Image (cartoon, rainbow, N blue to C red):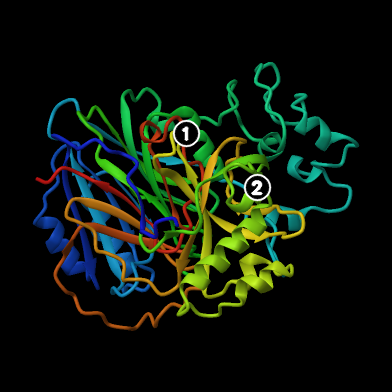
Amino acid sequence: MFARRPLVARLSRSRPHRLLHVAAHTLPGATPSGLAAHLASHPATPGSAILYTLHPDLPEIGALLKVIQSLKVPSVGSIALSPPGTDPSISIVQLSPTTSTEHLTTFHAPITGRPAVQVGKWQRDPLMHARKVGAAKREEDRKGEEVGEMERVMLGLGASGGAAEGSGARVMGWDALWRSGRDVDADGAEPAPRELEGVQGVQTMLLLADGQPDALLRMLNTRYPDVQKIGLITYPTPFLTNRPYTLFHNQSVHEHGAVGIALSGTRQRPHGGVEYPGLRPLGPVETIAQAQGNLLLRFEPSSSVAGLTNPTQALIRAINAFRADSPSSPRPAEAASAARGISIGKGMKEEEYYLALWDRDGSEPYQVVKIMSGDPSRGAISLEMEEPLLSGQKVQFMHKPTRTAPMSKPDANEIAFTTLPQEEYTAESAAAVYSNVAAQPGFAAASEGGFFFADANGQAGRIATGVCNVTGARGFLRFQAQ
């Protein structure tokens, strides 16, 4: 029987040596005066940069923001939630170079991906409302009018999208359709942020992104394949700032893309990775025989329990075996109902189910993705991911009970991003008064949208290209203790 131990993926194994000076803190219930006093006790040095997040329920957000921006230190920030069980907080980390070779570059990447599906009333761009019958249409409104245009784009034939004319880059399939009409370079990637032009030796990036990071991740993994990256999907702010997302870069405000800090010239990357507290194996490691995009279609019979090649039936059998071995587990007949065709994603309310994608050597998972639904008759399992599955790839079903241990606090000199449950956030009264308790060590921010982490050196050539939305998962960077 397979072991039932919590899954922990440490994607960067090397231990750090001398690195930047890092002051990372979380300030519960911060006030402008308390924040000013805290920053005064950690004075910035030349070449420093600051990354921060503000909880939407904090009173006087404008005054808090003014305190940070008055430092005249390059900074990036956004709105984000706090981990469960904690007061609304400011999380702030100040990075300061310790040698002449270390450099910190703040930037804004004005790249956003496909918008989320809109349900119900949706307001178009004001320019659309001004358009009259017979007036010239914007190019994006003409997409799809020509017969065969979609087919041309997906075949990478040039003029209608996918690759720029004369670039020689032929982007085909769905990726070409997503990129249609976008500004791409000759290698098929979107341009790097303007502030990073000419910056050499980038080793680590810290990012705060909007809710559509797919295009951003493509650019980062193409332009910076060997760069360690960690980013948080920030809190949507249409009712707070009248912007879909609110990203701060120095004194500028942006509503899409991402802001971040690039670390270059350091002697060693910080120790980083992803932890999945409470996530446990559900069945053995399997080998994919057939897949299409994000659809898992068939297992190799030699790797599957009892020779089951139907992935959905293999998952149902694993769930039933687990429940039979755990009689105290709630709703033991749930898996049987899934066998009659109920969507796994909707039928399993008590627990969450995922698929772990393993390195080529099978030593550890480099990514864990959510199972959206399954078809017991056809076998296909749909996964919430951007990266296509590959034949021969090793995978393993995982499950996470909804009742798990409280999330751990960050260590000193640690930046930690946590995924919150996918539930609608209910803001507390803006007039609420929170106690201004002492600053706590470590940077802690959370999001219902999740986070992303990539470290190519620790993943046997595979880069995690999607957002981690495993409830309770934790992406982290640990810097050397000062």
Residue 2 vs 482, above or below: the answer is below
- Residue at the image position 43 percent from the left and 45 percent from the top: 365
Q: Amino acid at mark 2?
A: Leu
- The residue at which mark 2 appears reads as 296
Quarter placement of the N terminus:
bottom left
Given residues 281 and 36, the one toward you in this image is 281
Q: Amino acid at mark 1?
A: Arg
Labels 1 & 2 near each other (Cβ < 8 A) = no
Given residues 472 and 247, the one toward you in this image is 472
Picture quadrant of residue 404: bottom left
Residue 294 is situated, as x and y percent measured from the top left of the image, at: 64, 46
Residue 238 at least partly seen:
no
- Residue at the image position 62 percent from the left and 66 percent from the top: 345
Tell me if 269 is positioned left or right of 219 in this view.
left
Picture quadrant of residue 103: top left
Q: Residues within 10 Å of mark 1 (few under 14, many from 20)?
A: some
Tell me if 169 is positioned left or right of 405 in this view.
right
Q: Between marks 1 and 2, how big is the CA–CA gap? A: 18 Å
Residue 274 vs 85, above or below: the answer is above
Residue 477 at least partly seen:
yes
Residue 192 is situated, as x and y percent measured from the top left of the image, at: 47, 31
- Residue at the image position 32 percent from the left and 45 percent from the top: 10
Quarter placement of the C terminus:
top left
Where disc 1 sits, the SS reads loop
Residue 343 is situated, as x and y percent measured from the top left of the image, at: 68, 66
Tell me if 80 is positioned left or right of 151 in this view.
left
The label on residue 360 is: 1
Tell me if 444 is positioned left or right of 116 in this view.
left
Residue 331 is situated, as x and y percent measured from the top left of the image, at: 55, 80
Q: Earlier in the sequence, mark 1 or mark 2?
A: 2
